[in-house]
Image (cartoon, grey):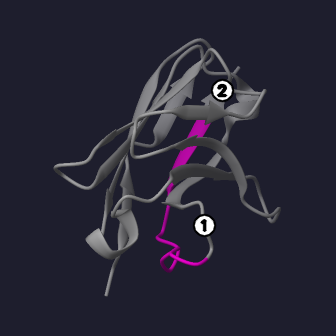
Amino acid sequence: QVQLVESGGGFFQTGGSAKLSCVVAASVFGGNVMGWYRRMGEEDRKLVARIWSSGDTMYADSVKDRFTISRDNSRNTVFLQMNNLKPEDTGRYYCNAVSPIVRGPWGLGTQVTVSS
């Protein structure tokens, strides 16, 4: 059963913007802290942004002040607004619960490629 479906990726110019969406199964979304992760090549996924059910957020230094994570609790959806994109933002983006206890199987992710 598919529990996480990411979308919104594509090819972007440096300085451009993108908005990623992720529809999450209720069993994973719930009142849990949700995050967006980036995977570059064969490296491990790295958490770039997280959001609590209250709306509080936290970001990796590399994306702070450029990315904004949000959630729609009525639609079990998480968003990532990406502004002022840089080539180093290139990677495959996934969403999932931050806690491994409630984390669902990883989805396919969505590829973001930023050209210089």
Q: Which residue is mark 1?
A: 99
| Range of magenta residues | 101-113
Q: Is the residue 7 above or below the residue 66 in the image?
A: below
**Classed neighbour count for the residue bearing mark 2: other residues with Cα under 10 Å, few (<14), some (14–19), many (≥20):** some
Residue 91: in magenta span: no
- Rendered residue at 41%/34% (across/down): 55
- Quarter where residue 81 is shown: top left
Query: On the picture, is 32 further left or further right than 41?
Result: left
Residue 62 x %, y %: 77, 27
Residue 59 x %, y %: 66, 32
What is the C-alpha distance between the residues marked 1 and 2?
33 Å
Q: Which residue is mark 2?
A: 115
- Rendered residue at 54%/51% (across/down): 35
Which of the pair 40/48 is nearer the observer?
48
- The quadrant in which the C terminus is found is top right
Q: Amino acid at mark 1?
A: Ser
Q: What secondary structure is marked by label 1?
A: loop
